């Protein structure tokens, strides 16, 4: 698919015409990754963050949230719970937390790999190569790092640099792949300043990077961030501003599937947040094949507020898991067993 065609779909309106896109994506999903929906248990291990990302509620300047870092025993208990619920993977996610040390994380990963059969995915932000290699050696399988937008000027405007560092997530993703990780990335949809052209370029970059996992979701304004208070900060709205809408999110999921046939694509929590009724199911029927149920202990979950009103903050993992499994089965889909590695990876190795 060429850029012009991607752009055409991004600009297409009307359910009649769009139903063709949903159909093509669903067919491609069925043909290339099958009927299985893989479940990944998400553990939000720390909400400390040293960065100042303009959109994220965990940014270091937000003094209105209580900060936590789970202990290794707490995290391992969550991993066992994910395993007992039948999930094949745990995803450990955190802000960029300097309190997460190289050796501590290494030992934690080894322990989870020793005590369970889970695949381990990390989503810990931009970390030094040395740490990333050490964690891979400890047994980590996959790394998630959204590049958020491929346009450098927009990226820089929403990611004020840390003193003395230069952020290049796209270069880091390429290195992560060389280190041996299965790699995942993605973008937010409807970032203030994001144009249709930007978004089409993002989708083409998913393909160029040969991503094994692609996670996208709508930008959701958070009051405690600069991008959540557009009245206080002047942002130039481009003529072709991408809306942070549900429909636009489905378009990006569908196009990602059509370009990256064998990638694992989650129907994300941000989607479930803007449509709690059917967001997850619609994502799954328009190209997605993964769901990431939250297994973080309830007391911490509410504090992991990257954006407001996050879906499922109040549910227990077990309740959510059983409701979700029922809904997935009623769509005629099956629950993935085992690790659910991306078939894209077997093509690469
Ligand atoms: N709205 C939507 N998504 C957000 N993220 C962070 N803040 C927001 C927000 N306000 C997403 C980013 C990040 C992922 C963990 O959460 O894409 O990579």
Image: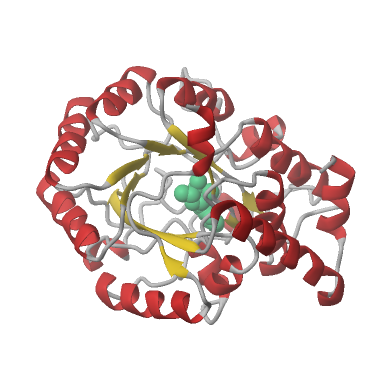
Residue 252 visible in the displayed image: yes
Which picture quadrant has residue 78? bottom left
Q: Is residue 28 above or below residue 328?
A: above
Q: Residue at x 60, y 72 (%)?
A: 282
Residue 275, how many percent across, how many down? 57, 76
* 86 displayed left or right of 168: left
Which picture quadrant has residue 65? bottom left
Q: Is residue 60 above or below residue 303?
A: above
* Colour pattern of the rendering: secondary structure
Q: Residue at x 50, y 25 (%)?
A: 172
Residue 234, how many percent across, how many down? 71, 49
* Depth order, front residue of 267/1: 1
* Depth order, front residue of 166/65: 166
* 348 displayed left or right of 251: left
* Depth order, front residue of 47/270: 270
Residue 189, how many percent across, how many down? 66, 54
Q: Residue at x 20, y 53 (%)?
A: 79
The total number of labels drawn is 0
What is the quadrant of the N terminus in the image? top right
Residue 259, how many percent across, how many down? 71, 45
Q: Is residue 196 above or below residue 36?
A: above
* Depth order, front residue of 347/148: 347
Residue 244 visible in the displayed image: no
């Amino acid at each position: 698919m060429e850029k012009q065609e991607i752009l055409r779909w991004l600009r297409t309106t009307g359910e009649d015409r769009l139903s063709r896109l949903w159909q093509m994506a669903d067919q491609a999903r069925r043909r290339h990754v099958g009927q299985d929906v893989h479940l990944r248990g998400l553990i939000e291990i720390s909400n400390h963050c040293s960065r100042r990302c303009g959109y994220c509620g965990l940014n270091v300047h937000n003094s209105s949230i209580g900060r936590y870092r789970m202990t290794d025993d707490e995290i391992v208990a969550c991993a066992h719970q994910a395993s007992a619920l039948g999930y094949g993977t745990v995803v450990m996610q955190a802000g960029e937390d300097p309190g997460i040390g190289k050796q501590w994380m290494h030992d934690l990963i080894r322990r989870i790999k020793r005590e369970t059969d889970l695949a381990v995915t990390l989503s810990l932000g931009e970390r030094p190569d040395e740490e990333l290699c050490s964690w891979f050696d400890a047994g980590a399988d996959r790394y998630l790092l959204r590049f958020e937008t491929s346009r450098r000027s927009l990226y820089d405007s929403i990611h004020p640099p840390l003193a003395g560092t230069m952020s290049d997530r796209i270069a880091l993703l390429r290195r992560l792949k060389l280190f041996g990780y299965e790699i995942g990335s993605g973008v937010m949809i409807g970032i203030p300043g994001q144009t249709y052209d930007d978004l089409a370029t993002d989708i083409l970059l998913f393909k160029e990077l040969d991503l094994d996992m692609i996670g996208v979701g709508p930008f959701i304004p958070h009051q405690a961030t600069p991008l959540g208070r557009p009245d206080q900060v002047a942002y130039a709205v481009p003529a072709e501003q991408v809306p942070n809408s549900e429909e636009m999110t489905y378009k990006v999921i569908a196009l990602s599937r059509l370009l990256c046939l064998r990638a694992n694509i989650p129907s994300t929590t941000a989607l479930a947040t803007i449509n709690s009724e059917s967001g997850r199911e619609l994502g799954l029927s328009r190209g997605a094949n993964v769901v990431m149920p939250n297994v973080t202990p309830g007391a911490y979950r509410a504090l992991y507020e990257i954006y407001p009103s996050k879906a499922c903050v109040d549910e227990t993992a077990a309740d959510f898991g059983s409701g979700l499994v029922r809904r997935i089965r009623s769509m005629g889909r099956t629950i993935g067993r085992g690790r659910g590695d991306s078939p894209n990876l077997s093509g690469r190795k």
